[in-house]
Image: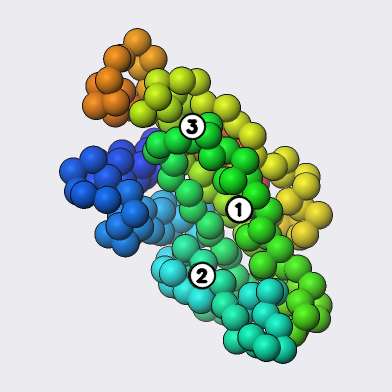
């Protein structure tokens, strides 16, 4: 299946979190996610012969000021076209615990990341917005449909894609919802019950739209 790596990236990240102390905060977990998602892009979205991938690359940030002109923003996966210099910015979230409790924070983070990429800057003016007008930004969110720690139904409170596209029309949201058996009583049992992607049809449709935009 063309979505296999998306599912595997989440399962591997959760497994690392559960088997290592403070694993959900580890850079090793980040590396796992980046590796899988990078391969997903090369397998399903773009041609590896035409694009390069740079994990955790720092780029100029719109929040730079005359007092802090070199402020940067770290991109989880930065893809650059070898021929056209077109860029793809992938911003990745893999949610595990306290998802509903922190839902508004996740949404605010997404809007803030758009602003840091495309916003007007006290230092750069509208230069970043102009330079990046043809670039593509993809927010990938990997999340279980049942909270792994609480066993409650996931509530999507993220910003609407139309609001994000106020910053730039080439922004996409790829929300990947993993199935969890709600009848399981413990966190470990719920993790072991992680199944297929619930909204796979929607994910494939968005993937198709991303490919057309590239």
Q: Position of residue 199 (x, y in %)?
A: 53, 28
Question: Which image quarter: residue 63?
Answer: bottom right
- Of helix, strand and loop, which one carries label 2? strand
Query: Is 10 displayed left or right of 90 in the figure?
Result: left
Count residues near mark 3 (Cα–Cα under 10 Å), then give few for <14, some for 14-19, many for 20+: many
Closest to the observer, 178 or 111: 111
Spatial CA span between label 1 and label 2: 13 Å
- Of helix, strand and loop, which one carries label 1? helix
Q: Which residue lies under the disc numbered 3? A: 177
Determine the residue positioned at 63% across, 45% down. Answer: 107
Q: Earlier in the sequence, mark 2 or mark 3?
A: 2
Quarter of the image for the N terminus: give it: top left
Q: Which residue lies under the disc numbered 1? A: 109
Q: Between tags 1 and 2, which lies in front?
A: 1
Q: Which residue lies under the disc numbered 2? A: 74
Q: Between tags 3 and 1, which lies in front?
A: 1
Determine the residue positioned at 69% across, 42% down. Answer: 159
Spatial CA span between label 3 and label 1: 19 Å
Residue 84 appears in the rendering: no
Question: Looking at the image, which residue sits at the far top?
Answer: 183
Q: Is residue 175 above or below residue 86?
A: above
Spatial CA span between label 2 and label 3: 25 Å
Q: Position of residue 192 (x, y in %)?
A: 25, 26
């Amino acid at each position: 299946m063309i979505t296999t790596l998306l599912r595997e990236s989440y399962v591997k990240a959760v497994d690392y979190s559960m088997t290592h102390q403070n694993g959900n905060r580890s850079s090793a977990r980040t590396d796992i996610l980046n590796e899988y998602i990078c391969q997903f892009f090369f397998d399903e979205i773009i041609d590896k012969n035409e694009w390069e991938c740079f994990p955790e690359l720092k780029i100029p940030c719109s929040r730079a000021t005359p007092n802090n002109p070199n402020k940067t923003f770290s991109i989880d996966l930065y893809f650059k076209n070898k021929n056209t210099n077109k860029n793809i910015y992938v911003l990745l979230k893999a949610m595990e615990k306290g998802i509903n409790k922190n839902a508004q924070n996740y949404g605010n983070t997404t809007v803030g990341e758009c602003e840091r990429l495309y916003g007007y800057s006290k230092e750069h003016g509208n230069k970043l917005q102009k330079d990046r007008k043809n670039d593509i930004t993809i927010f990938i969110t990997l999340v279980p449909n049942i909270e792994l720690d609480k066993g409650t139904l996931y509530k999507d409170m993220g910003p609407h894609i139309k609001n994000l596209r106020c910053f730039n029309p080439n922004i996409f949201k790829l929300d990947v919802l993993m199935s969890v058996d709600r009848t399981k009583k413990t966190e470990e049992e719920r993790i072991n019950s992680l199944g297929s992607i619930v909204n796979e049809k929607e994910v494939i449709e968005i993937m198709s739209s991303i490919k057309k935009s590239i």
